[in-house]
């Protein structure tokens, strides 16, 4: 499930405020435009009660996975004689009347090449199993939806507590956090313990069901599409396990068994990504002409910061709408940000491509209205583009101060940014690695989690998005070419 309501604000904002200046956009980003929200109002008691119902039906689900009710389908098939296991009068009659399937005729009779036989095939796609598969779909949608929301809420709470104390980040970052935080749920720290407990239970249910999705009772019935009415059949009424499924589904659904996910409008998400990109660029020391009007339907904006120049322009990459960032300092470097609701792979010569996705499990750029670090991921791409567009590396791309050099290492004494040139021997290519000088990881109980997706986000921001290559939890960088981890 996705929270599509927040993205609709982008459509409303576009209809009211297209062709405005950046100062106006900056003002409206606090008062009119929603670039971050805490999803929906969370009722912890309601989630807890629903989880109890799910946990109550979970043993029955496991038993049905292990031993479902199926029907046998009797099919007549013409097969080679060596494959026949069952023959009857119909087999002999068919063989005697179809000489084209004879291999030979002997004194003792005919020798058939093929025989008509009955094959019995398991039919899982009965009504009760389709109800069962839709029950699984509903539970998975529910657990994944609230797991994402609760994970983002815990993560946001920690970011607002910890990052405001960090002195490595520039003042624009604090301003951005303050603007995004406006209206955010206060006093959430009082609910940390119950949120962690609920998240653990949601993850347990999700892992139990996800491990069994390849079983035929689900895999074959999941393919059956279309609307269905929930009705009480003999099996759903009499069988002890299927009766539990019926009770649960009756309590959840009124009428049609519609378990389709909430859909985000692609255009809403596209313009949300455009707005967030402009917001991220404007809060990374870069600035644009205060008198220039912004046409959000056809972006072509120029931002500058000392010797750095960044152009934001609409483009198409492999047929997909994209936001092209072109960096110029001493050379040109291009990064394309491609908003997409579905997993896609894109590539274009001379352009580094990143897919923006609102899905928590994405392997590329997680850009969601419910995740407060979404704008930092865009700023991470900005930092990379600014570094790769420079040759001499005199000016720190993060804070603008003068950088010092030691061999292949460039460092800034003010913001402690380190930029180091590395070489991949397997692919014979150079690349840059960035870190924070003398950085020490701060760990507490909320910075580790059994939730793999949440832990992935924690590990991603372990260096406060100051790294332009992926990092492991022990701060080893991952080569972008061979994907091997290397300690600095």
Image (tube, helix red, strand yellow):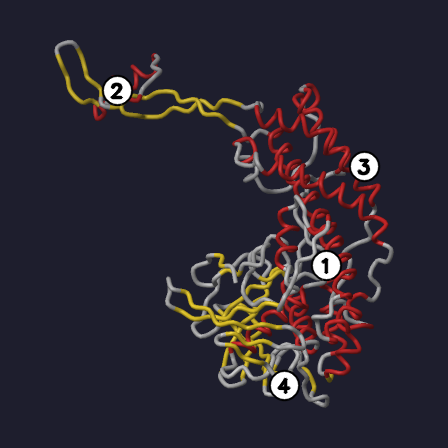
Foreground tag (2 vs 1): 1
Residue at disc 1, secondary structure: loop
Label 3 vs 4, first from the N-terminus:
3
Give the residue at x 53% y 61%.
477
Give the residue at x 69% y 19%.
238
Asked whether, in this view, residue 182 is left or right of residue 93, the answer is right
Which residue in the protein does label 4 denote? 304
Which residue in the protein does label 3 denote? 49
Q: CA distance from mark 1 to mark 4?
A: 29 Å
Q: CA distance from mark 2 to mark 3?
A: 67 Å
Q: Position of residue 447 (x, y in %)?
A: 70, 52
Residue at disc 2, secondary structure: helix
Label 4: few (<14), some or many (≥20) within 10 Å?
Answer: some
Considering depth in this image, is 12 or 210 the residue closer to the camera? Answer: 210
Residue at disc 3, secondary structure: helix
Q: Tell me the tag on residue 97.
A: 2
Give the residue at x 59% y 87%.
307
Q: Residue 227 is drawn in which quadrant? A: top right
Q: CA distance from mark 3 to mark 1?
A: 24 Å
Foreground tag (2 vs 3): 3
Foreground tag (3 vs 4): 4
Considering depth in this image, is 155 or 425 the residue closer to the camera? Answer: 425
Q: Are marks 2 and 1 in contact (CB under 8 Å)?
A: no
Farthest top residue?
108
Label 2: few (<14), some or many (≥20) within 10 Å?
Answer: few
Q: Position of residue 191 (x, y in %)?
A: 83, 48
Q: Tell me the tag on residue 465.
A: none
Asked whether, in this view, residue 485 is left or right of residue 473, the answer is left
Q: Are marks 2 and 3 in contact (CB under 8 Å)?
A: no
Q: CA distance from mark 3 to mark 4?
A: 53 Å
Q: Are marks 3 and 4 in contact (CB under 8 Å)?
A: no
Which residue in the protein does label 1 denote? 370
């Amino acid at each position: 499930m996705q929270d599509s309501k927040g993205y609709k604000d982008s459509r409303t904002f576009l209809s009211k405020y297209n062709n405005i200046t950046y100062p106006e956009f900056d003002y409206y980003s606090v008062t009119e435009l929603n670039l971050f929200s805490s999803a929906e109002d969370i009722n912890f008691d309601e989630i807890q009660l629903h989880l109890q119902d799910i946990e109550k039906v979970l043993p029955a689900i496991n038993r049905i996975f292990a031993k479902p009710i199926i029907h046998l389908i009797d099919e007549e098939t013409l097969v080679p004689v060596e494959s026949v296991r069952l023959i009857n009068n119909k087999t002999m009659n068919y063989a005697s009347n179809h000489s084209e399937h004879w291999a030979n005729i002997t004194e003792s009779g005919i020798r058939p090449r093929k025989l008509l036989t009955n094959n019995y095939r398991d039919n899982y796609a009965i009504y009760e199993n389709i109800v069962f598969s839709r029950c699984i779909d509903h539970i998975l949608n529910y657990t994944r939806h609230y797991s994402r929301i609760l994970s983002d809420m815990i993560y946001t709470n920690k970011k607002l507590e910890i990052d405001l104390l960090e002195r490595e980040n520039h003042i624009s970052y604090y301003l951005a956090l303050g603007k995004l935080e406006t209206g955010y749920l206060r006093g959430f720290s009082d609910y940390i313990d119950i949120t962690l407990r609920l998240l653990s239970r949601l993850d347990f249910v999700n892992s139990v069901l996800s491990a069994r999705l390849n079983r035929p009772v689900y895999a074959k019935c999941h393919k059956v599409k279309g609307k269905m009415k929930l009705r009480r059949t003999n099996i759903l009424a009499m069988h002890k396990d299927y009766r539990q499924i019926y009770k649960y589904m009756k309590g959840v659904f009124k009428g049609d068994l519609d378990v389709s996910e909430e859909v985000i409008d692609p255009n809403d998400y596209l313009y949300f990504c455009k707005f967030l990109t402009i917001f991220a660029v404007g809060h990374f020391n870069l600035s644009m002409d205060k008198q220039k009007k912004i046409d959000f339907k056809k972006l072509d904006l120029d931002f500058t910061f000392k010797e750095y120049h960044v152009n934001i322009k609409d483009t198409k990459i492999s047929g997909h709408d994209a936001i092209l960032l072109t960096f110029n300092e001493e050379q040109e470097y291009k990064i394309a940000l491609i908003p997409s609701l579905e997993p896609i792979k894109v590539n274009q010569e001379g352009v580094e491509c990143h897919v923006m996705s609102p899905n928590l499990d994405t392997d590329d750029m997680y850009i969601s209205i419910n995740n407060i670090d979404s704008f930092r991921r865009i700023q991470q791409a900005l930092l990379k583009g600014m570094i790769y567009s420079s040759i001499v590396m005199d000016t720190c791309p993060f804070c603008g101060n003068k950088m010092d050099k030691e061999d292949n290492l460039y460092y800034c004494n003010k913001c402690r940014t380190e930029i180091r040139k590395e070489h991949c021997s397997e692919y014979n290519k150079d690349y840059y690695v960035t870190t924070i000088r003398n950085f020490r990881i701060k760990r507490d109980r909320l910075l580790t989690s059994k939730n793999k997706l949440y832990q992935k986000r924690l590990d991603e921001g372990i260096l406060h998005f100051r790294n332009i290559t992926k990092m492991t939890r022990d701060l080893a960088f991952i080569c972008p070419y061979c994907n091997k981890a290397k300690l600095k």
